[in-house]
Image (cartoon, rainbow, N blue to C red):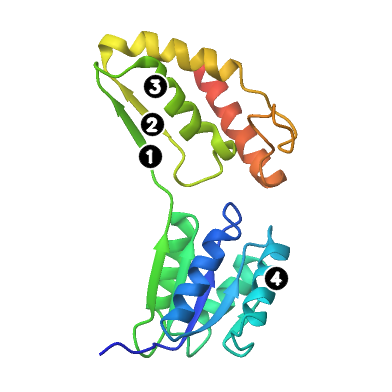
Amino acid sequence: RLTARGPWVCLSPWNFPLAIFMGQVAAALATGNTVLAKPAEQTPALALEAVKLLHAAGVPECALQLLHGPGETVGAALVAAPGVAGVVFTGSTQVAKIIHRALAAKDGPIVALIAETGGINAMVVDSTALPEQVRDAVMQSAFRSARQRCSALRLLCVHAEIADQVIAMIQGAARELVTGDPALLCTDLGPVIDKGAFDAIQGQLKRLHSEDK
């Protein structure tokens, strides 16, 4: 029979700071569990306001508790805490594996883990595709949200018959992208989340440039 499992740890990401946070928390509550919610350290204020609304709507404070802090300390402590019945996590594959190993090492009943991680998202384009439509789809999927989403296009496979034309159109569209303040309607690409993300991108660019030489 269906029954609640107990306390769930909800670890949500910064790139969908309300949708994924609320989805994790609401699902755990709706199935009769209590929740220890830890949002990404980059987006604590939004999570706080969301929890305030849930409490105001009638969710008991003892059933939903909010905990802020870095994943490597606060998140790790929550995963390791005794009595935790399940963990739901959205983030990198590397961190998901760390959580999985930590839960597997615990004594007692098996702790459930629900993990949503990234991947190599591919688009396959055959010779009958309209190049203009491919260009628009690629630009939206690859560059929307400054690529800061697990569903962003990462691998484009184009049929040889139309590859040159499609690639040229994508290059032209990319050169037209406007970076700047996301509050302005003319902006196509806003900033990345923090300096750590910026430095990681710069590191990748330097690696690519060095490989081209």
- Residue labelled with disc 2: 155
Residue at mark 4 to residue at mark 3: CA–CA distance: 41 Å
| Amino acid type, label 1 | Asn
Which mark is on residue 180?
Answer: none
Q: Contact (CB < 8 A) between labels 3 and 2?
A: no
- Residue labelled with disc 1: 121
Which mark is on residue 48?
Answer: 4
- Mark 4 neighbour density, 10 Å: few (under 14) some (14–19) many (20 or more): some
Front residue (pair 81, 123)? 123
- Mark 2 neighbour density, 10 Å: few (under 14) some (14–19) many (20 or more): few
Vertical relation: 109 (above or below) 105: below
Q: Earlier in the sequence, mark 4 or mark 1?
A: 4
Q: Contact (CB < 8 A) between labels 1 and 3?
A: no
> Residue 191, percent across and down?
69, 38
| Amino acid type, label 4 | Leu
Residue 192 in view (yes/no): yes
Front position among marks 4 and 1? 4
- Residue labelled with disc 3: 133
Which element carries disc 2, helix, strand or loop?
Answer: strand
123 on left or right of 13 = left
Residue at mark 1 to residue at mark 3: CA–CA distance: 18 Å
For the point 39% across and 46% down, the residue is 119
Front residue (pair 66, 185)? 185
Front position among marks 1 and 3? 3
Which element carries disc 3, helix, strand or loop?
Answer: helix
Vertical relation: 192 (above or below) 103: above
Vertical relation: 65 (above or below) 174: below
| Amino acid type, label 2 | Leu
Residue at mark 4 to residue at mark 1: CA–CA distance: 32 Å
Q: Earlier in the sequence, mark 4 or mark 3?
A: 4
